[in-house]
Amino acid sequence: MSDALENIVGAFQPGPSPGPGRTPGPIGMTILLICWMVTGLLPFAFSVTDLKLATGRIGTPGTLTVVSCDSLGQGRYDCKGSFAPDGGGDAIAVAASPDSTAGDVRRTRLTPEGDRAVPTGATGVLAALTMPFLGVGVLAFLPYVFLYVLKVRRGRRATVICGGLLTLVSLAGVVIGMVASYA
């Protein structure tokens, strides 16, 4: 066999199993669990503004008309739009969603910064919930890992079942949110 093929085959061979002293200690495990928890909670924090915009709690209501979409290559687009506030006034040039096409008209809310318009209604809410559903998926098996690290045997099966169900709910929510954001 050639060296390249041997390297590929060797990569799939089981390595040494961790023994005493090869796993993170209590401090290392605590740091890893905190990082996992923060990674799961960040999508919730980042989606608050988009949820407030989609539900109409903040932002200026109006209509977005997509003016142009320039291809950036590799299936990516840079779209620009014109936002007309409901209360009247001059149209504002804003960034439009990259999945738009020139000529699209939709109900949106202008961000407080005035740089982009976010869809409102059910479509906007479902699109804004994509990130929180992703956070649910990241956090789904964290209770099981806590029980495992603390060497608690009682309740592990229930946390695995719950984690699996939360992962399925998360997957469904992310898919629905992605479909809504491209609708």
Image (spheres, rainbow, N blue to C red):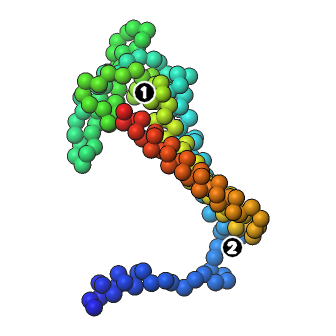
Quarter residue 85 falls in: top left
- Residue 10 in the image: state x and y as whole percent: 40, 85
Label 2 residue SS? loop
Kindly identify the residue that appears in the image at 35 percent across and 81 percent down. Answer: 8
Query: Can you say whether 32 is above or below 69 in the image?
Result: below
Question: Residue 118, can we see it?
Answer: yes
> Looking at this view, is 175 or 127 the one in front?
175
Residue 125 image offset from top left, x and y in percent: 50, 31
Q: Which residue is mark 1?
A: 119
Using the rendered image of the protein, determine whether residue 114 is visible from the camera's viewpoint.
Answer: no
Q: Which mark is residue 25?
A: 2
- 163 up-or-down from 84: above or below: below
- Look at the numbered disc 1 and give the secondary structure of its residue: strand
- Residue 5: horizontal and vertical position, in percent? 30, 84
Assign the N terminus to one quadrant of the image. bottom left
The location of residue 113, given as percent across then percent down, is 46, 27
Badge 1: few (under 14), some or many (20 or more) residues near its Cα, within 10 Å?
many
CA distance for labels 1 and 2:
47 Å
**Residue at point 34% right, 30% down?**
96
**Which mark, by number, is residue 66?**
none
Q: Residues within 10 Å of mark 2 (few under 14, many from 20)?
A: few
- Vertical relation: 34 (above or below) 24: above
Query: Which quadrant is home to the C terminus?
Result: top left
